[in-house]
Each structure stands twice: as C-alpha cells, then as structure tokens.
Image (cartoon, rainbow, N blue to C red):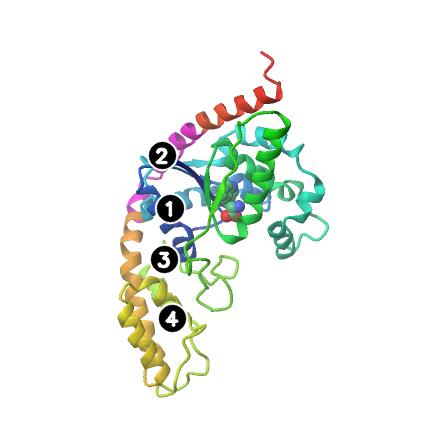
Amino acid sequence: MKKVILTGDRPTGKLHLGHYVGSLQNRLKMQADPNNHIFVMIADQQALTDNAKTPEKVQQSVTEVALDYLAVGLDPERTTIFIQSQIPQLPELTMYYLNLVTMARLQRNPTVKSEIQEKGFNESIPAGFFMYPVSQAADITAFKATHVPVGEDQRPMLEQTREIARDFNRIYGTETLVEPDIILPPKGHGRLVGVDGKGKMSKSLNNGIYLSDSEDEIQKKVMSMYTDPNHIRVEDPGQIEGNVVFTYLDVFDEDKEKVQELKDHYRKGGLGDVKIKRYLNEVLQARLKPIRERREEYAKDRDAVLEMLKSGSEKAERVAAETLAEVKAAMGINYF
Ligand code: TRP
C-alpha cells in the first residue's frame, strides 16, 4: 500500500546522535521503500513560536539541519525536503482549523503543558506557541499524510490532528482530510540518553554528540562519558545498567557478541573504564566519519543546499495548494 509519510524537525541547532537513532535512521529505511512518499519538513515556523527574539538562530539552523539530512543520506530525489515557512498554505489551513479547537482542548495537551513548564513561560505564553499543535495539524493534513513517524512526546499532536481532521470532515461533509497514524521509533531506539547520563540527549542539556562533531570532539565526549560512579578500581565489579558507554555500545555496535563479552567482563571486574571508552570511541568514529565527510562536502556549496530546499519547497507547495483548494471548497469559501 502506498504510504504518504510526513515528519519534521524544529531547526534550533544541529542534529545529534539522538536524532540519528530516534528518527534519521528510520527515515532512511522508509526512503528505501518505493511505496513510500516521504516529506521531511524543517519546521522553522514552529521553532519561532518559542524563539521569536532570535530568528537568526532558527534561520542558521535551517541549513545546518538540511546538511545533516544530506549527510546521513536523505536523498532529495526521493524525499521531499522543504521549509515550513515557505508554504503559505500551512498558516492558511491553521486559521480555519483554529475555529474547530477550543482553548480548553489546547490547554489539555500534555506535551505543550510540560514545554510551558520547561521554558518557564509562566503566565506569559506566546499565543503562537500555545496553538502550535493546530499548526502541526495543518503541516500533516496539507500533505494528506497517512503516517507520521515521531517520538512518543508527539503523540498528543497526532491525537489532536486526528480530531481536527475528523471534525473538519464531519462538519463540512467531506472526506478531504486524512486521519494520520503515528509511527513510533523501534523499541530501544526511543530517545537516546546524553553523555552525562542525566537525561535524554539534548542541546539544552549540553550532553550531545553531533553528526558534525570533529574526531577530537567525539573522543573528548566519549572519554568524559558517565559510567558507573562506584567502579573505582579496574578490579572492582562494574554496573552495566545506566552506564552510558554500554547503552551506546548496545545501540551502535553491530558486534553484539563482543558487547556481551565486554559486559560480562565489566560486571565481573577487571575491565577499566578507559578501555571500554576507547573501544566505544572506535565504534562511534567509524560510524560518524563517513557522515561527517559527506557533510563537509555538501557544506562547501551552501547555495546548492538552498537550491535543493527551494525546489523541495516548491514541490511541497503544489501539494498543499491542492489540499487548501479542497478545504476551501468544502467550506464554501471558494468564491471566484
Ligand atoms: N513538533 C515536532 C518536534 O518538535 C516538529 C514538527 C513540526 C513535526 N511539524 C511536524 C513533526 C509535523 C511531525 C509532523 O519534533
């Protein structure tokens, strides 16, 4: 069956290993299936809902994220990569959808609730931020996406999108909008823990390894990684659970037997942190080197990257325009 897949990222910085295991790898797999039509959106408008005062950060991140996409192997010939703000039909759809959503419903969205806490908005919540789930419903329905691969934290957005699509179709007696299904990351590939072991890898916690990091930066981060604080002498038995080095080996090392041996040895005692870190460093360097090199190659010609984004945005706009025309026809506001 043909699937229309839409997903996106907020451009607020470069992409890291958490993005790689949580979403990019999955996109590459989906891209390889010719039955899939994939749209990948750089959600700059959504990023601006809480970065309105630093638009340059968002603007610069758009190209950085695009470079990360190309570096890991997203192929603009097969995947439509586009910039949200370049598709005027999206805010137009949002305007109509907003009338189908109550303030109370917006207030109930658990992801928005916790973001409001995290960002310390208190009583000064930007209205645009508060209603971004509706704008996200526009992103998804404009392309009649059947599937949306996202993390668990995005489930409330998908639920709201389905409600909006359902309500729209019922109220206006149409079948224009598609209710999308969520695709969650494969088990164990949810959000990767950061190098400090304290929380998920994220820019704000400054605990990430980036796809663009140099060999030295990667090595430094690996060597300072959180392990088992009670594993003081080499001969002490060590703990695997919560030990970031082993978490990463589980995710990134294809040699599962070797990982098992290392775990057994570490548990028993006699295997030092420096050794396992050096080994993880090799594994990660091997994985990241080709990505970084491709990224450097693409970064030599940023105009070409912008050209790619322009042509992707044009393609996306044509699709969104068709949906918008249907939406307006269903509402009877296609006057001329
Ligand atoms: N909210 C998503 C995030 O924070 C980004 C996003 C915006 C998105 N629009 C989307 C994801 C549409 C999937 C579909 O990661």
Distance from label 4 to label 1 (Cα)?
25 Å
Please indicate whether residue 21 sits to the left or right of residue 153 in the image: left
Q: For numbered disc 4, what is the local secondary structure?
A: helix
**Quadrant in the picture for the C terminus:** top right
The mark lying in front, picked from 2 and 4, is 4
Disc number placed over residue 213 in the picture, else none: 3
Please indicate whether residue 103 sits to the left or right of residue 272 in the image: right
Of mark 4 and mark 1, the one earlier in the sequence is 1
Residue at image coords 52%, 58%: 204
Of mark 2 and mark 1, the one earlier in the sequence is 1
Q: Residue furthest top?
A: 336
**Quadrant in the picture for the N terminus:** top left
157 is higher (above) or lower (below) than 122: above
Disc number placed over residue 245 in the picture, else none: 4
For badge 2, the amino acid type reads Met
For badge 4, the amino acid type reads Val
Distance from label 1 to label 3 (Cα)?
22 Å
Badge 2: residue crowd in 10 Å (few <14, some 14–19, many ≥20): some
Of mark 3 and mark 4, the one earlier in the sequence is 3
Distance from label 3 to label 4 (Cα)?
18 Å
Residue 314 lies within the magenta run: yes
Disc number placed over residue 27 in the picture, else none: 1
Distance from label 2 to label 4 (Cα)?
37 Å
Residue 37 lies within the magenta run: no
Whether the residue carrying mark 3 lies under 8 Å from ligand 1 is answered with no
Residue at image coords 41%, 42%: 63
| Residue named by callout 2 | 308
